[in-house]
Image (tube, rainbow, N blue to C red):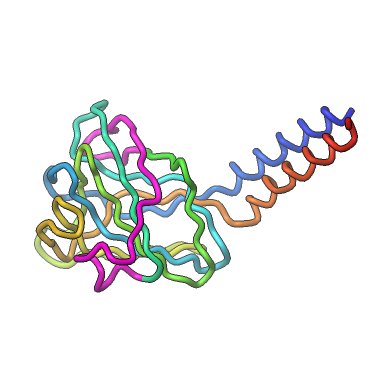
Amino acid sequence: MIRKAFLSFAALALATTVASADILNTAPPNNGRSEDGAGVFVDLTATSGNLTVIEIGMVSGEPENGPVRLRVWRRTGSYVGFDGTSDGWSIVDEVDAFSAGTTNPTSFFLNNPIALAHGEVTGFLFQGLIGGVRYTGTGSGGHQTTFSDANLTLFSDVARGAPEFGGSRFSPRTFSGYINYIPAPSSLALLGLAGLACGARRRRA
């Protein structure tokens, strides 16, 4: 009986998490293939409550089905003014995938989902260790650097070649792809699962 209740709760929790996921898209890329190790800087701000980023879709310079690798750097506060130094930055994830091609975002499901606190700006460097990165901003005229929906705002206007923080700087250059996130209440379901599991263990003891 307890096992059935636990499984039912698990299914409900998973359904709630999946159903509440949302995606913020940016513009398609218009540059050529960058070198391996190049990256693009991004600021993310949760605007309606705490959020958790579970997936990053980034356009690679690698042909379809080629191996690619994303390294995610993070800092507290905006990247603006800090794209030329590693001070305050830390690596929070590294994900391997196979390229979706040079015009479509490659899906990188994070090993370590990233928490965004409501109202706080968090800076990121999305570094294409293998496959480089494609972005917007190389064409003539202006282009969009800020994207937002009801829950999340993204700002991006700098890219750098390899090595990180020390390669050639390009601006304005904007991240091309998407951010897949869930609102913090969805994570409460996972906490509930843990609590239910503990309760079941206590009853069996």
Pinpoint residue 40: horizontal percent, then vertical percent.
24, 55
Residue located 19% across and 58% down the image:
159
Question: Is residue 149 positioned above or below 111 on the image?
Answer: below
Q: Is residue 78 above or below residue 13?
A: below
Q: In the picture, residue 76 is in which quadrant?
A: bottom left
Say which residue appears at 39% left-offset and 46% top-offset.
93
Residue 173 horizontal side relative to residue 93, left or right: left
**Quadrant of the rendered structure where residue 41 is?**
bottom left
Image quadrant holding the C terminus, namely top right
Say if 41 sits above or below 204 in the image.
below
Please tell me which residue is depicted at 30% across the width and 42% down the height of the picture.
Answer: 70
Q: Main structural element of the magenta stretch: helix, strand or loop?
A: loop
- Residue 30 part of the magenta-drawn span: no
Q: Which residues are magenta?
A: 78-106
Pinpoint residue 129: horizontal percent, then vertical percent: 23, 42
Q: Specify whether 193 is left or right of 23.
A: right
Where does residue 91 sit, x and y in percent of width and height?
Answer: 35, 52
